[in-house]
Amino acid sequence: MKNIFLSFVLLLTLVLGVQHARGQGYTPSPENLAAREWFDQAGFGLFIHWGVYSILGDGEWVMNNQNISIDEYQKLPGFFNPIAFDAEAWVQMAKAAGMKYITITSRHHDGFSMFDSAVTSYDIVEATPYKKDVLKSLAEACQKADIKLFFYYSLLDWYRDDYFPRGRTGTGIPGRGEGKWEDYIAFMKAQLRELLTNYGPIGGIWFDGHWDQKKWDGKKFGALQVDWHYDELYGLIHELQPQALVGNNHHLGILEGEDFQMFEKDLPGKNTTGWGTPEDQIGNVPLEVCETINGSWGFNLQDRRHKSTRELIHYLVKAAAYGSNLLLNVGPMPNGEIQPEHKKSLLEMGDWLKTYGPTVYGTDKSPLTPHEQYVATRKGNRIFLHVLDPQVKIVHLEDVPVKINSVRHYDTQKKLPYKQSRFGVQIDLSALVLDSTDTILELTISNP
């Protein structure tokens, strides 16, 4: 019966997709523009990578990295029974951390759907002993707590035959068949329709995997080898939920129909990973940096690269200084619990934000160029200078394009001596005991 329903839904989705014709152009709705403004000021969000891959404790790419066959991987859902999952506890943890939104994997590259989908039986409700829709529980908890919910959705798929032609990844996975690309597009549209109609108002869709279908010479991306039908996918989202923001982790400039731009494990314009988005391709839309608490996105039992709270706070304020949100990731354990060390770090960040949140939330990129020793955010005629090196005694600011009227220590509001000349600004910190994590100075300027 479900196969008949699947065929009907896919056919209906193809027919309805005609209305999203190419070349119509994209004009954001008033609801979308308001959502962009909210997102631009949000500052901090929680990323959650969770799926049946968590059982193996080797990250979310384990199917690809270990070349696990389709037949073998299909056994994993039978072991996935997250009886300790508590949606409200997750949401309250995010709120205590000072986070304003949550982005969770609805379907990752392994092709398994973490929600109740009518167009596949390869989902958490039908294929696991848990038999519950975790996204439904999370959506209800987010709505109750006034936390916006975004859905990560993978464009690439190592499981389905109709993800064909193959991309650059998953080529060593045994048991992959061949199918029709048009069927895969119809499947994705049907699932997106479900995500946009069954879970209440959502913050947006976070796409990933575009890069799988781009040629790569080891240094840069080349030509795209397929048509992702973004006009149809994006058009569907904007039609069903006009306020929902569309983002795509393609490491390129903004494509038509996209509402925010993300940067994976890199600050905007930087390229420490080798696939960073060039600085000249940063769009005029809200920005987001995503980063891990340790070294993995999905649960990794042996990952010991846990970042200190100091490092995480530095990443948060650096992201803000680049005019970006920070989307900080946790990889829940297969039983549904967040790792204790992750919860500890998030709560410590939340404690810090209770005092210093005004220097992050609702701020913009400042006119001061970020430096290894300091970064700055801006709110109206105030610049918040975050001094990240506790050994600094004199702050030297070069190329200051605004007139500084006063400099105060944020905590005590004590005035600090400074000198501004055509060569820049010097601020004397010798009378302060600098904070080991972040000493914040408040600079007032003439032109807001």
Image (tube, rainbow, N blue to C red):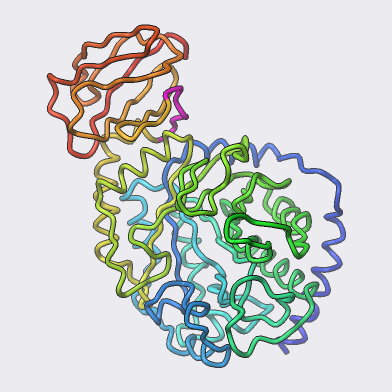
Frontmost residue, 3 versus 230: 230
Frontmost residue, 396 versus 386: 396
- Residue 77, how many percent across, how many down? 49, 85
Depicted 232 relative to depicted 320: above or below: below
Q: Quadrant of residue 36?
A: top right
> Does the stretch in magenta take in 188?
no
Name the residue located 37 percent from the left edge and 11 percent from the top edge: 423
For the N terminus, which image quadrant?
bottom right
> Does the stretch in magenta take in 367?
yes
35 sits left or right of 304 in the view: right
- Residue 377, how many percent across, how many down? 40, 29
Depicted 64 relative to depicted 39: above or below: below
Q: Quadrant of residue 141?
A: bottom left
Dominant SS type (magenta): loop
Residue 146 visible in the picture? no
- Residue 352, how many percent across, how many down? 25, 41
Name the residue located 55 percent from the left edge and 67 percent from the top edge: 106
168 sits left or right of 388 in the view: right
Name the residue located 33 percent from the left edge and 17 percent from the top edge: 443
49 sits left or right of 160 in the view: left
Q: Quadrant of residue 28?
A: top right
Disc tally is 0
Q: Which residues are magenta?
A: 361-368
- Residue 41, how many percent across, how many down? 48, 36
